[in-house]
Image: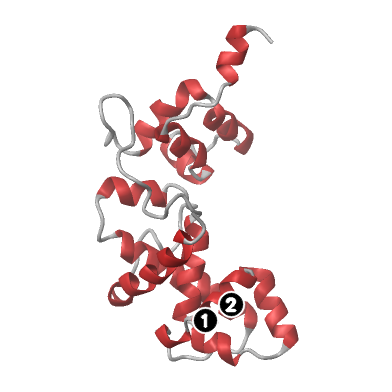
Amino acid sequence: MEPSKASAERRCPSPSCELAASVHPTRLAARLDANLSAATLIQLQKSSRLQIRMARLLLDNEMDLNGAVSGPDLLLGHDPKRAALLAGSIWHARSLIKLISKQHVAVLIGRVGEEVQAFGIRHASHAVSTRVIADPQQLAQEIDDDGHACLGAWLDEVSAPDRSRVLLRLAVGTAADHPENEYREAASRLFSLVLAHLATEG
């Protein structure tokens, strides 16, 4: 392989490049051109030559002069959708406990995963919602929606750059973008449990 080609394909090691590579395609399309194809967006994200420039664009220039993203990631590098689902499972833990049909449990796990189901049951004492949802499809959707709303409420308490670095890894249009006030009181408590869980993974 020619040196120039090897250099072009070498992965950019900086946090800024990692951010550009991990941003959800819908966020990138919203900033660049909504008509760009998924394949084109992926190619742009893989370009080490463009990654720092894209990170600066996505963070509204809130980077240092060397193009670096400062500070640790709030979610310790973990997928924000996963974190949201974990928070949502605690929110709806009462429903998870009541869901005992093997068929219903299988449907739920197929939607949110076994980890999310087990995590919510394990932290049932911190449940927020008093409503019991018997339908597994509806419960899965509520876990998703309320979990993302909790994530958004939690992120509203941090700096704008830190908030953006997490939201950029989520699709446009989740409840994390505009959380309602009802989530703000419990968000910090739920995410302390989520972060403690994520931290065990290193």
Helix, strand or loop at label 1? It is: helix
Instruction: Residue type at mark 1: give it.
Output: Arg
Residue 199 location in percent, x, y? 45, 60
Residue ID at (57%, 71%): 116
Depicted 66 relative to depicted 89: above or below? above
Q: Is residue 152 something one can see in this rendering? A: yes
On screen, residue 30 above or below 131: above
At horizontal 56% and vertical 29% (from top left) the residue drawn is 46
Q: Residue at x 32, y 52 (%)?
A: 163
- Residue that mark 1 sits on: 122
**Residue nearest the viewer, comparing 113 with 72:** 72
Q: Quadrant of the N terminus?
A: top right
Q: Which residue is mark 2?
A: 118
Asked if labels 2 and 1 touch by Cβ distance under 8 angstroms, the answer is: yes
How many numbered dots are placed on residues in this image?
2
Task: Name the colouring of the figure.
Answer: secondary structure
Give whichever of 73, 99 is nearer the camera. 73
Query: In the figure, residue 5 lies in which quadrant?
Result: top right
Measure the C-alpha gap from mark 1 to mark 2: 6 Å
Q: Which mark is residue 85?
A: none
Q: Is residue 28 above or below residue 192?
A: above
| Residue in view at x 60 percent, y 8 percent | 3
Residue 195 in percent (x, y) is at: 41, 63
Tag 2's secondary structure?
helix
Residue 140 seen in the figure:
no
Q: What percent of the width, then of the height, locates residue 188? A: 31, 70
- Amino acid at dot 2: Ala
